[in-house]
Amino acid sequence: MKLVRHFRDFTWDDVDVLAYKDGGPYKDVTRQVLFEGQDALPAQWRYFEVAPGGHSTLERHEHLHNVLILRGRGQCLVDGVVSDIGEHDLVHVPSLSWHQFRAAADAPLGFLCLVASERDRPQLPAEADLAELRRNPAVATFIRP
Amino acid sequence: MKLVRHFRDFTWDDVDVLAYKDGGPYKDVTRQVLFEGQDALPAQWRYFEVAPGGHSTLERHEHLHNVLILRGRGQCLVDGVVSDIGEHDLVHVPSLSWHQFRAAADAPLGFLCLVASERDRPQLPAEADLAELRRNPAVATFIRP
């Protein structure tokens, strides 16, 4: 690996722009792995970009996310609360919190997301989970299952 | 901890601006801990800012650094090579590499730096280390021990 990798237009030297995930409901999201986890630093550091009007998957998992918004603006659902988010804001997604990121209609939402190298697979909401989430009108309006 | 923390002028809600370190040679550097490591994600995520003309400590350690430049520009020494660095460039500091970050004379250098929660203390260069580093003229000009 080159030790210094330069940035241009939200891509980096020797970093592939990948599909966000193989399947699962989402719209207009890409993924780039900036740093693979190593034994001595067991955390994978990724950059995701949600195009204007797009959204990540509504999901939850045991593992935590630490997020820093690098570009643009939008909203996120974390732990039952919908928040406006913009450049350099921080988001912590606790274990087993339902969460989803959406870009604004007129701006992308690009964010750094840190996860443990060893982690469980995301869970998608069942009908009962969606019914529970929709009891909060703000959440009901926000989510894109 | 608030799950969403907003950014303003390179500070964040509920994040203290700290001294870079208690002692050791450096000039005009601050530290902010954006995310403490947790058992489930054992990596601490910090933001350092080097003021124009300032520099971090010339040091090495067993633990790795993964770095993303968030603001400004400058240069870094990593593993015997001096590189220009600017916004959103990535830097990987391998185990036991001598490294130092310097801001440009007319711009700050602010960067995200990821480390394992459990890590060894930095080592400072002895005279023999400095003599070895100075065999490369570019490195000799760059370093501020």
Image: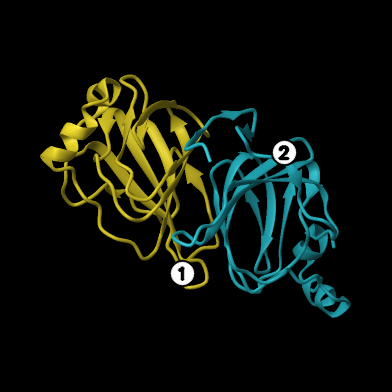
Chain colours: A yellow, B cyan
* Whether residue B104 can be seen here: no
Residue B108 is labelled as 2
Q: Quarter-wise, where is residue B76 in the image?
A: bottom right
Looking at the image, which residue is at 64% across and 74% down?
Answer: B62
| Residue B57 vertical position relative to residue A77 in the rendered view, above or below | below
Residue B31 in percent (x, y) is at 70, 47
Q: In the image, is A85 to the left or to the right of B89? A: left
* Whether residue A48 can be seen here: yes
Q: Are marks 2 and 1 in contact (CB under 8 Å)?
A: no
The secondary structure type at the circle numbered 2 is loop
Looking at the image, which residue is at 80% across and 46% down?
Answer: B54
For disc 2, the neighbor class at 10 Å (few under 14, some 14 to 19, many from 20) is many
In the depicted view, which residue is nearer to us: A107 or B137? Answer: A107
Residue B17 in percent (x, y) is at 72, 40
What type is the residue that disc 1 sits on?
Answer: Gln
Q: In the image, is A71 to the left or to the right of B143? A: left
Residue A83 in percent (x, y) is at 41, 27
Looking at the image, which residue is at 40% across and 36% down?
Answer: A110
